[in-house]
Amino acid sequence: MMKYANFPGCSAETTGKSFTVSTKYVSERIGFELVDIPDWNCCGTSAASLTSPELAIALPARSLAIAERELPGLDVVAACAGCFRSLKTSLAFARESDENLEHVRELIDMPYNAEANVVSLLEAFVSDDVRSSIAEHVTRELRCLKVACYYGCAMVRPAEVCDFDDVEDPRSMDELMELIGAEPVDWAFKTECCGAAQQMAIPKQARPMIERIFENAAANGADCIVTSCPLCMLNLDMREAEINRARIAEGKKPFDIPCYYFTELIGLSFGAEPAEVGIDIHFHPAEMLLLRRELDALEAQEADLAAQAEERRKKAEIAARIAQKKAEKAKKAAESEKEAKR
Amino acid sequence: MRALDLSGISEADIRACKEIATEAGVDLKDCYQCGKCTAGCPLAEGMDLMPREVIRFLQLGALDVVLDAKTPWICAQCAVCSSRCPQNVDICSTMRAVRIAAKRAGKRPVPEADIFDDEFIANVRAHGVSNEQYLAAMYNLKSGHFTQDMGNATRMLKRRMVGVAIHNTKGRAEVAALIDRALGADEGGE
Ligand code: SF4
Ligand code: SF4
């Protein structure tokens, strides 16, 4: 499917701007259509579920009911992992029984049948249609870029609700990155939590979570982290500087690990300039690494070509020697035949 | 795990602990205290009770210990614990249920976490969406963390990530009514 009802989420125009911009860039080129749900409202995220279970069901259901009415037949896509989980939790509740569905209708005071499915943008992008369309548009493989694909928690947990990829070792983003030539690393923190809103509410307890994510990515040879959620992105990218200040004070080496949205990297592989996909407004400098790796890739390409030429030369050389030997052998055979006849 | 005088636990406490578990969809008897939930919890080092202990004290009916614990308020709701529990105990939902029960009992062991969520919902009630800059400002004001993320606010401004036209849901009155209805239904369901 290449057309979805879009739930933008509260960060789409603010802290998640680069996600929105890069999604648009890629979508337009591959013919992936996103129609915004008219007059959507906040999904409530964990603040709602920690306040009241009813609220956690009701807030997402209103937007889903509007989508059902205004954009019938379309599944709903949410770019943000937090929005995705909230929407899908509400949907799962409504689909559990007729009684639940009726309860949701009462809460939102709207007609609603829980018809449309909810997927994350990442899930929509790993469908066969989208994947083959992406492959057709790659003009510049992101060779030499070692990426740690970071899924975070809300994309996969709880598994019964999210119903997407492996809960401990998801592969879908890694496969997308391979598709555009980047090199995913194996690492242990793919689905570790970034701390979500707790990074703001209880920074002292929550900061080490981010530091450990960077540490594990670095230890496994990653150049950068690729994310699929604006809150993960904000927590990593914006707070890297603060973490580095603390590390320097402790005599530890600071990190130099830029973070990207998977859509930004796909855009680059289509030939976009960094600013066209929002990479120019990251907090941690994110353009230098790309330039370095572009150069590395060109050098690697040159080296490949040189190696191929060298291989061709060697083959020709050996073939020439074989031909020479064969000729010598034939000549000798002819001579000995002559000898025998005499 | 600390020593606890079980003689102070009343029938009502035991019942209340069971109710918390029911709210979370958990049968407390399922937990055999293996500790896997705690081993994977990314916030365990900042908690006063380990996730495993929260379940243990609920099993024992130690209501006050659980309601006074900081742990459910430190929890980031990442669900690693629930996902890895060999007995399918939903610890993550239990944290949520404890937190809601504590709040009802007038307790908030980590005020910052409570303020954050209240401000978040108030924000959504007013605009239909969460306006991050207002949320941050209100939170810092009420929690006393005046300078938190101030440097970052400047960095966001420079990137035009904040200060842009505020998106409001047109039907925000509708959203406010929905929030009131949901919170009302929740109280009614008690
Ligand atoms: S992982 Fe499950 S069984 Fe083990 S201690 Fe935690 S809740 Fe109990
Ligand atoms: S949901 Fe809470 S208790 Fe469970 S692992 Fe995550 S932070 Fe720890």
Image (tube, helix red, strand yellow):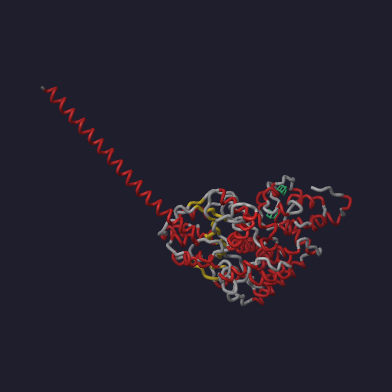
Q: In the image, what residue occupies the spot 64% across and 55% down?
A: A249
Q: Is residue B136 visible?
A: yes
Residue A164: give x, y in percent of width and height. 57, 55
How many marks on residues?
A: 0
Residue A218 higher or lower than A330, as above or below: below
Residue B76 at what x, y percent from top left?
Answer: 68, 58
Relative to A94, A122 lies left or right: left
Image quarter for ligand 2: bottom right
Image height of A14 relative to B3, above or below:
below
Residue at image location 60% in from the left, 74% down from the top? B163
Residue A113 screen position, x and y as percent: 61, 67
In the rendered image, the quadrant that contains the C terminus of chain A is top left
- Image side of residue B181 versus residue A125, left or right: right
Q: Nearer the viewer, residue B22 or B118?
A: B118
Residue A16 in which image quadrant = bottom right
The furthest residue to the right = B7
Answer yes or no: is residue A9 visible. Answer: no
Q: Tell which of A210 and B98 is nearer to you.
A: A210
A208 or A160, nearer to the observer: A208
Q: Position of residue A278 (x, y in %)?
A: 51, 66
Residue B106: quarter of image: bottom right
Q: Is residue A60 above or below residue A179?
A: below
Q: Is residue A77 above or below residue A297?
A: below
Q: Quadrant of residue A6?
A: bottom right
